[in-house]
Amino acid sequence: MTDDTALVAALEAIQSRGAIGESSISRAIEHAEQYVRKVPATAGTLVDLGSGGGLPGLVIAVRCPSLLITLVERRATRADLLRRAVHALDLADRVTVVADDVKVLADRSPGSFDVVTARSFAAPHITAKWASVLLQPDGVLVVSEPPEDDPRRWPAPMLASVGLTDCGRDEGVRVFRRL
C-alpha cells in the first residue's frame, strides 16, 4: 500500500487555490494511475502537457521515481503552484516545471521525450501535433478520454499526418505510438 499522505496534501493545497476542479482527490489519483500503468518500463523522460493542477503529472512523478519529468503549464499562477508541490514532494531533482506555451518547449526540445501525457490539454488534432513534435521515435502519447468512446475523435488520417498510430483505449485513457 502506497502512503499518499504527502501527495494528497499537495493536491489538496492546489485544489484549495482553484487549480483542481475534481471534488475527490482520491478519485483524481485513481484516474491518474491509469496513465502510470501506460508508461513503458523503459521510459526515461516524460512531459505532461497543460499540467494545470498536477494531474496526472504529480501522480506519475510520485509513482515512477526513475522518470525525468517536465510539467508544462503556460499559466504562471498554476505553474507556481506546481513548483510548490514539486518541492513539497521532494521531487525537484527530477521534475521541472516549464511556465510557458508548449510551442516554446517544442522549439527548444523536439524529439526529446519517451512519453507525452495530456489530460485536458487541447483538441485531439492539437494534442497529436505537439505530442508528435515532442516524442522520440517509438515514444507514446497517453491522453484522457471521455466516458463515451467516439472513434471519430482521433481520425486515422489526422494521426498519420503527424506520425502517430492509435494503440487503443484502455479504461479512461487512449495510447498512441510515434512511428
Image: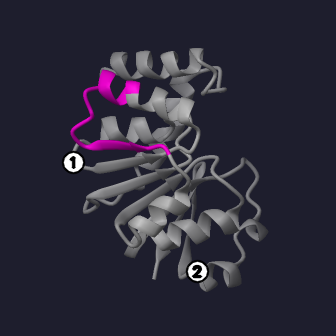
Categorize mark 1 by other alpha carbons within 10 Å: few (<14), some (14-19), many (20+): some
Judging by the rendered image, the residue that carries numbered circle 1 is 66
Under mark 1, the amino acid is Ser
Estimate the x, y position of residue 119 in percent, counting from the top left.
Answer: 59, 47
Q: Residue at point 31% right, 57% down? A: 45
Q: Residue at point 63% right, 51% down? A: 121
Q: Quadrant of residue 22?
A: top right
Q: Is residue 2 toward the left or the right of residue 156 in the image?
A: left
Under mark 2, the amino acid is Val
Q: Nearer the viewer, residue 158 or 29?
A: 158
Q: Is residue 91 toward the left or the right of residue 83 in the image?
A: left
Q: Residue at point 52% right, 66% down? A: 131
- Residue 161 visible: yes
Q: Which secondary structure, mark 2?
A: loop
Q: Is residue 85 magenta?
A: yes
Judging by the rendered image, the residue that carries numbered circle 2 is 162
Q: Which residues are magenta?
A: 84-99
* Marks 1 and 2, the one that precedes in the sequence: 1
Q: Quadrant of the N terminus?
A: top left
Categorize mark 2 by other alpha carbons within 10 Å: few (<14), some (14-19), many (20+): some
Estimate the x, y position of residue 84 in percent, counting from the top left.
Answer: 39, 24
Estimate the x, y position of residue 140 in percent, counting from the top left.
Answer: 44, 66
Colour setting:
one colour
Which label lies toward us, 1 or 2? Answer: 2
